[in-house]
Image: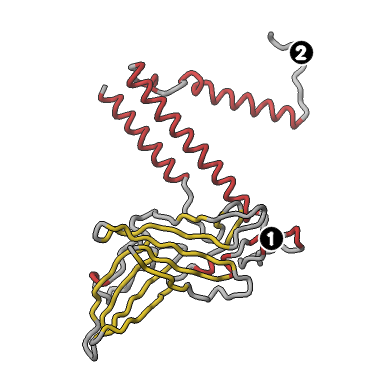
């Protein structure tokens, strides 16, 4: 029984690894929203936003470090560890207090978006018929502070005549929710002339759009579904064989007879396809 449980846990571990590898990392260059492709890679930099508030006899500076495409770059060792943005943060908030010529004092550092390795933003948009979304929201949760989970909501606005160097505007930070607005050409779909390395031109409109800009997401999704489905089939089948049928050894593999014949079936199928392509046919009688 112990051997069976070890085999079961091993299969569960393999299935989880397959699921983890099948899940593609957030691709800022080919971001899929409502079936349209957006290229946010030109915004893939650590950006610092700052607001100053006069709080006599001091001045309070609030800074937000933002990167919409990946976790922030680690701060240099010259910055005290207690004053650094936490690891894996995509958006970090820090508050510094200044008083005359005194040394600045960091009073607060917290993660607004992104906590664990592998955290990725959720992109939401409302569609209007067959038109690509001209605005969409970038959302990601952060750390828990005083029993309140911080989070960020960046509203991207398509601005074809703008500049991708434009910085986001702080709308509000209330109850742990940071709201930003970012008007840039990168927020326009490539199909509608959004900025990208391929110029964002649609071949149907006389441009040179990359044919793989929208197909990659579809095929990666299909591949992910197939791998996850197979992993679930394997795990559930093994659990059933072990816990219900009380099988052991190789018999815990679901549909064992089929998998034993699978290599021969593949070989027969390959041979059949080769015969069709090459025009070869076997002469004589077939066994009925």
Q: Residue at x 60, y 62 (%)?
A: 134
Labels 2 and 1: the sequence-earlier one:
1
Q: Residue at x 27, y 75 (%)?
A: 79
Query: Considering the numbered disc 2 on the image, is that residue within a helix, a strand or a loop?
Result: loop
**Marks 2 and 1: which is nearer the front?**
1
Q: Residue at x 34, y 33 (%)?
A: 10
Compared across the picture, whether 173 is left or right of 223 comes to: left
Number of dots carrying numbers? 2
Residue projecting furthest to the bottom:
101
For disc 2, the marked residue is 284
Compared across the picture, whether 279 is left or right of 201 comes to: right
Choose between 4 and 117: the one closer to the eye.
117
| Above or below, comparing residue 226 to residue 83 in the picture | above
Query: Considering the numbered disc 1 on the image, is that residue within a helix, a strand or a loop?
Result: loop
Callout 1: 10 Å neighbours few (<14), some, many (20+)? many
| Above or below, comparing residue 288 to residue 246 in the picture | above
Which quarter of the image is occupied by the C terminus? top right
Mark 2 to mark 1: distance in Å?
53 Å
For disc 1, the marked residue is 209
Compared across the picture, whether 226 is left or right of 269 comes to: left
Corner quadrant of residue 32: bottom right
Q: Residue at x 58, y 60 (%)?
A: 38
Task: Residue 147: give x, y in percent of width and height.
Answer: 25, 57
Corner quadrant of residue 49: bottom left
Which quarter of the image is occupied by the N terminus? top left
């Amino acid at each position: 029984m112990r051997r069976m449980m070890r085999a079961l846990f091993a299969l569960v571990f393999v299935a989880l690894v397959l699921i983890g590898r099948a899940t593609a990392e957030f691709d800022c260059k080919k971001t899929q929203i409502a079936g349209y492709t957006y290229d946010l890679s030109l915004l893939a930099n650590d950006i610092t936003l700052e607001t100053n508030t006069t709080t006599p006899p001091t001045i309070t500076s609030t800074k937000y470090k933002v990167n919409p495409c990946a976790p922030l770059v680690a701060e240099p060792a010259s910055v005290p560890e207690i004053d650094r943005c936490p690891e894996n943060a995509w958006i970090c908030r820090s508050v510094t207090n200044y008083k005359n010529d005194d040394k600045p004092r960091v009073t607060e550092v917290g993660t607004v978006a992104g906590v664990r390795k592998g955290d990725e933003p959720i992109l939401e948009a409302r569609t209007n018929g067959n038109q690509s979304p001209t605005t969409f929201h970038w959302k990601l949760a952060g750390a828990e502070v005083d029993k309140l989970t911080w989070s960020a909501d960046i509203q991207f606005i398509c601005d074809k005549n703008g500049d991708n160097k434009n910085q986001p505007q702080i709308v509000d930070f209330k109850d742990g929710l940071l709201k930003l607005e970012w008007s840039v050409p990168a927020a326009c779909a490539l199909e509608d002339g959004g900025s990208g390395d391929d110029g964002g031109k649609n071949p149907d409109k006389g441009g040179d759009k990359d044919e793989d800009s929208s197909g990659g997401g579809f095929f990666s999704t299909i591949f992910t579904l197939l791998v996850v489905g197979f992993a679930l089939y394997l795990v559930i089948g093994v659990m059933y064989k072990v816990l219900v049928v009380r099988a052991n050894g190789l018999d815990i593999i679901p549909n064992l007879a089929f998998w034993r014949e699978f290599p021969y079936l593949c070989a027969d199928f390959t041979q059949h396809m080769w015969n069709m392509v090459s025009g070869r046919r076997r002469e004589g009688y077939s066994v009925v």
